[in-house]
Image (cartoon, rainbow, N blue to C red):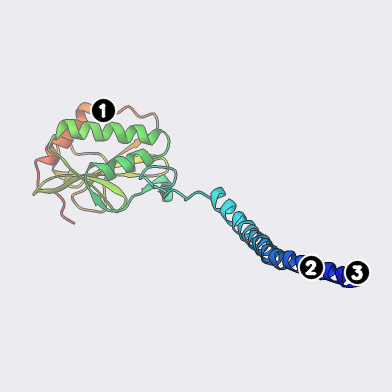
Amino acid sequence: MDSRVSAGKARQKSKTASRTTRAAPAARATKAQKTAAKSESAATSKASPKASRKSKSPPKAARKVTAGTSESKPLTLLAGGNPRIAKADGDAPVQAYIDGMPGWKRDVGRRLDALIVRSVPQVRKAVKWNSPFYGVEGQGWFLGIHTFTHYVKVAFFRGTSLRPMPPGASKSKETRYIDIREGDALDEPELAKWVKQAAALPGFRP
């Protein structure tokens, strides 16, 4: 009888050992899966804040600065309120100068510019020494405009040859001026005559 009991116990131990042997690989596999899952979760949690931060900062669009916008350099006024404009040829710098003339002087500048263009349709324009210049191609410059504190000065560079001669004297032998003050009535017919005469003469060549 003792031998049968011993044999039974031996068989039971053998079955238990067999189950343990079969379970061990499965347990190791389960443990490995859990470890891999934890590693993957940790990697995801580390990556997600970066991805979140990137998604909150979309690429910046390139900024465009257009001439004439608020991001352009502001116009500087020199002594007497004369606009500071870089030397350049053409109508554009002259219009920039006129737009920069302060207060009532701007209207005077526009009226003078329009009168000169009507009187001399082929007129050539430029800004030199912070003053609009008007001339004829191949003949030089016949007229200039400058802004002062209390008036706008019109210079006829061959003014002594005009009839009647403009009233304002100059240190320059041939130049004559007219000064236009606030409230003055422009004698446009007289101005137009002077402009046409001046455009027909050899002009000033700096």
- Residue placed under numbered mark 2 in the picture: 11
Q: Do the residues labelled 2 and 3 touch (CB within 8 Å)?
A: no
Q: What residue type is labelled 1?
A: Asp
- Element type at marker 1? loop
Q: Nearer the viewer, mark 1 or mark 2?
A: 2
Q: How far apart are marks 2 and 3 (CA)?
A: 16 Å
- Residue placed under numbered mark 1 in the picture: 187
- Residue at horizontal 71 percent and vertical 68 percent from the top: 21
- Residue at horizontal 19 percent and vertical 57 percent from the top: 206
Tag 1 or tag 3, which sits nearer the N-term? 3
Left or right: 129, with 57 as reference point: left
Left or right: 206, with 1 as reference point: left
In this view, 178 is above or below 50: above
Q: Residues within 10 Å of mark 3 (few under 14, many from 20)?
A: few
Left or right: 74, with 175 as reference point: right
Q: What residue type is labelled 2?
A: Arg
Q: Nearer the viewer, mark 2 or mark 3?
A: 3
Residue positioned most to the right: 2
In this view, 180 is above or below 8: above
> 165 or 56: which is nearer to us?
56
